[in-house]
Image (spheres, rainbow, N blue to C red):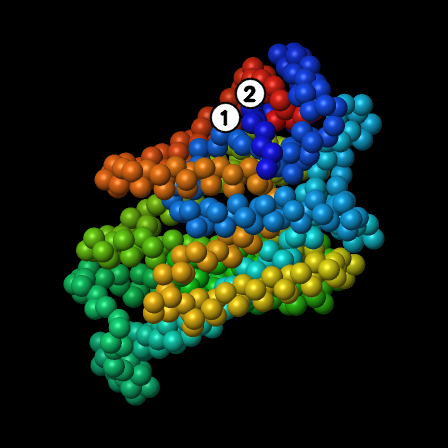
Amino acid sequence: MLLAFYTTGMSSPGRSSPHLAASKANDLRFYIWSGHTNWAINIENWGWFIEWTPAFIGSGMLIGLNSAISMFVGSFLAWGLIGPLLVHYGECIGKAYDPEDPIWHDYMSFTSLRGLGNGHPPSPRYWLLWPGVMIMVCASLAELFIQYKVIWMALKTVFREVNSSLDNAAKKRGKTIAFFAKHGSGERHKELIEDPARPEDLVKDWMWMLGLVVTLVVAFIICHVQWGMHVGLTILASLLGFLFAFLCIQIGAVTDTTPLTAAAKASQLVFGGATSGMHDLKQAQRLNLIAGGIASGAADVANALTCDLRTGFLLRTPPIKQWKAQAIGTFISVWLAPGMFVLFTSAYPCIIHPNDYDTCPFAAPSVSAWAAVAQAVTDKNIGIPVKSGIFACVMGAASVLQVIVRHYYLIGEREKWRKWLPNWGAIALSFVIPVPVFTNAALIGAILAALWQRFRAKSWETYGYAVAAGFIAGEGMGGVVGACLQLDGVAGDVYGTMVGCPMNSC
């Protein structure tokens, strides 16, 4: 496989600088070195280059070889094999950035999700979106049904604990409610671990109940005022959020893979049916995206909170102290997150106005996928390519088959082969998000971590996770500094280099 090393400087579309006048000459040399053919441009077009991105290298160090290799294989299948074949045989088309440019007329985009439903062949990205979504949904649902005993045990436990809490509350008021008393005194499942926390260290029922009520009321108000969303639809989105949060926590705990993307897409499909009768198509699509955000956001936050509480459980940290710390962090993030969004959108306005710019340093590929799904489930003029749908069904069936084989065949002495099975969630993610450069970086990180663990195990245990976390956090803070420099007009597009960057668009 051909790889090109990519030297980047953050740029702002629509801006130019005299410091970059020599860049085009350098770009021409790369084109000449390729023999006046388009192989070098094709590497760039399909994203097969290496970019030094510490955040994804650090992520690769944490996710391990199996997930990193699965992501790389998914990228190779999607953007190194299937995508080029679709374009070669005319099933999909690309879009030239500037077809009139005598030098860069071969510089193409194969990831456009604009102009859907106009009768023209779709982009490879739209064609591959549906197999990716199908794999995520099928693999997640298969894991759910396979783990039905765990799910049923969890449901019974939740039902018993709720009735027990209500029964205790009634007894404190000198009342006895037979239904709560009967179902709240059920026998505890033998596999459940007894909570070691003292009663005074537990989170009081009124705390989380009050928080739940306040959150729901605020959600009703904001969704109605800001988005024109009916209260009934907000309740449906909240219920889906609770359901997907419950499922993601259970599946994540058993399989170590949290199906958040599948939950988001599933909620979009549900709301596609709920808003199918609306006359205002744009409003239906807007509500579809909001509902997906509520459902997947609730699942994401619940899963992260459960992981934090599990860590506290292992460290014997009092739950009430963790709850207070989470509350403080939440209050701060409520104000900090919008501020960061305003900072980045001010520095890079193409984030919220993509149609006004030819290129953007923040392509937001996952956001575009969400928008495409919302259009497909609400607009009758936009359909799924037949061959894409067939391929999606085949890939979905393959992912389900692996789940069955893993749980019912690879047991006992054959269980050792489970580690060689691919991670279908990671493969599907590479189908949905067209950025092989990130999977390349994650694979590099995973290989570095594997070698480090292999030859310096103790050193890895001491420093490995800290180094990976530093890579991730460091690039995040670097992005904030870069946004500030962009606002001051002294960023990489002014004083940086564009050597090797097609059309000066790095």
Which of the marked residues, 1 or 2, is nearer the chain's N terminus? 1
Q: Quadrant of residue 494?
A: top right
Q: Which residue is mark 1?
A: 482
Residue found 47% across the figure and 69% down from its top: 405
Q: Quadrant of the C terminus?
A: top right
Q: Residue furthest front?
A: 413
**Residue 469 point in image, percent of width and height:** 36, 38
Q: Quadrant of the N terminus?
A: top right
Inspect this view and state whether residue 356 appears.
no
| Badge 2 element | helix
Which residue type carries mark 1?
Answer: Gly
**Residue 364 point in image, percent of width and height:** 59, 41
Q: Residues within 10 Å of mark 1 (few under 14, many from 20)?
A: some
**Image vertical order of residue 398 relative to residue 9, above or below:** below
Q: Quadrant of residue 288?
A: bottom right
Q: Residues within 10 Å of mark 2 (few under 14, many from 20)?
A: some
| Numbered tag placed on residue 492 in the rendering | 2
- Which residue is more in the foreground, 377 or 342? 377
